[in-house]
Amino acid sequence: MKILVINAGSSSLKYQLIDMDNEHVIAKGNCERIGIEGSLITHKTDDGRKVQLESNFPTHTEAFEKLLEVLTTGEGKVIDSIAEISAVGHRVLHGSEVYKESTLITDKVIDDIDSFRELGPLHNPPQAATMRACRKALGESVPMVAVFDTSFHQTMPEKAFMYGIPYEYYEKYSLRKYGFHGTSHRYVSGHYLKITGKKPEGTKVVVCHLGNGSSITAVKDGKCVDTTMGFTPLDGLIMGTRSGAVDPSVVTFMMNKEGFTPDEISSLLNKKSGFLGISGLSSDARDLVNASKEGNKRAKLACDMFRYQIKKYIGSYAAAMGGLDAVLFTGGIGENSDEARAEVCEGLEFLGIELDDAENKNKTGKDHLISKGKTEVWVIPTDEEMTIARDTKELVEKAGK
C-alpha cells in the first residue's frame, strides 16, 4: 500500500509518498510560496535524485496538481501512475471539539474542517481546499484520512483546558485550550514507550517539541494531561516570531497606546515577536546562538528566555503529574542543540535529571539516551508523517476500502 501524506500550510504544501509494506519513504517534497510570486517545488527521491522547479501556484489546488505530475513524470518520477496511490493522509491543524481522533474524510468532514477557519485561519481553509483538490484529481474511490493536530490533546481534563473567563463564552464559541503539535507529541511519547518496552500505565513523561514553533506536553499513562499551546498556537513558550504567553492586559495596553486593530495586534504577536522581536536580529535560534557568542546581549536574552521557560514548564508538569520518568526532546532545536538541552536540564537534579555530557553532544540523528540519572532524558527525532500514514492505513483497512 502506497500512501501519500499531505501537510498543507498557509503558503506551502509538504508531501511524502510512503510504501507502507515496509514503511519506506519513496519520495518527499515541498511546494513553497503558494499564492506568492516565485513559487517552486522541491522534490527528492529515495535514490538521491533532486528536482527543483519554478512554477505558478496561485492556490493549493495548482500545487497539488504539480506534485502529482512530479511523482509520475520527468526526472523525479517514482510511480508510473497516480493509480498506485492507495490512500491519502492529510495533516489538519484544528479539529475543534468535534474530532477527537483521526477520521475518514467525507464531504461533511471537509466542510467541518473549513468551518473551523476561525480557530485555524491560516491552515484550515487551505487544508480543506487541498482535500477537495485531492478528491478531484484522484477520484472518490481513493480514501482519504484527516489526522488532527489537536486530537492528542483532547484527553486533557477540564481543569487544564478551561480558561477563567465567563463559562458562556466556552459554550458560545468553544473558547478553551486546544493545544497543537499533537501528532508529534503522540509519536514521540509513543515511540519512547516502544523503545523502552514500557507500558503506558504509570508513566509520567514531558515531551519538548522545540523549533521555530515550540510546545511542551505532559503525558501521563500515555495520554496528554496538559500542554503549553492554547486556543491558538500563540500561547506557551516564546518562539521564532510568536510571543508565547503574555498578560492579556499587555495586549489591550498596546492597542490603546498604539491604536492597533485586532488584526494588527495579532500580526504583531504572531509574526513580529518572539526571538525576532526580542533580538531585533532573527527568528532563527541558530543565528541567536551565534550572535550570543559574539556578545549580542539581546540575542542572548532571547536564548535565556526560551531555555528558562522550558525549564519552568518541565518543573510545573512534573508537579502536575506527581512525578517524572522522562523528558523527551524533539523538533529542530530539541534534536540538534546540545547547548539548549544542557542549559534546560541544569538545576533539575532535584527531579532526578543528570545529563551524560558526552551523549548529549553526540549528534547521532537517531533515538538516544542522553542522561545517567534516575529520570531519563532522550532525544527522539519526530516523525509526524509516519504517524499520519499509519493512522491512514489503519482506518482504510478497518473500513475495507
Image (cartoon, rainbow, N blue to C red):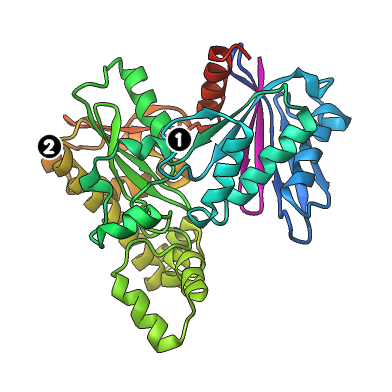
Q: Which residues are magenta?
A: 1-18
Residue under numbered circle 2: 322
Considering depth in this image, is 339 or 310 the residue closer to the camera?
A: 310
Q: Which mark is residue 183?
A: 1
Viewer-proximal residue, 318 or 117? Answer: 117
Looking at this rendering, what residue extends furthest in the right direction?
74
- Report the front residue among 40 and 349: 40
Residue 325 screen position, x and y as percent: 20, 30
Q: Quadrant of residue 327?
A: top left
* Place of residue 256 in the rendered image (x, y in percent of width and height, measured from the top left): 39, 86
Residue 183 position (above or below residue 305)? above
Characterize the local packing of mark 1: few (<14), some (14-19) or many (20 or more) Cα atoms within 10 angstroms: many
Residue kind at label 2, given as amino acid type:
Gly
Which one is earlier in the sequence, the residue at label 2 or at label 1?
1
Identity of the residue drawn at 41% across and 67% down:
299
Q: Is residue 186 left or right of residue 200?
A: right
* 37 to the left or right of 171: right
Q: Would you say residue 8 sits in the magenta stretch?
A: yes
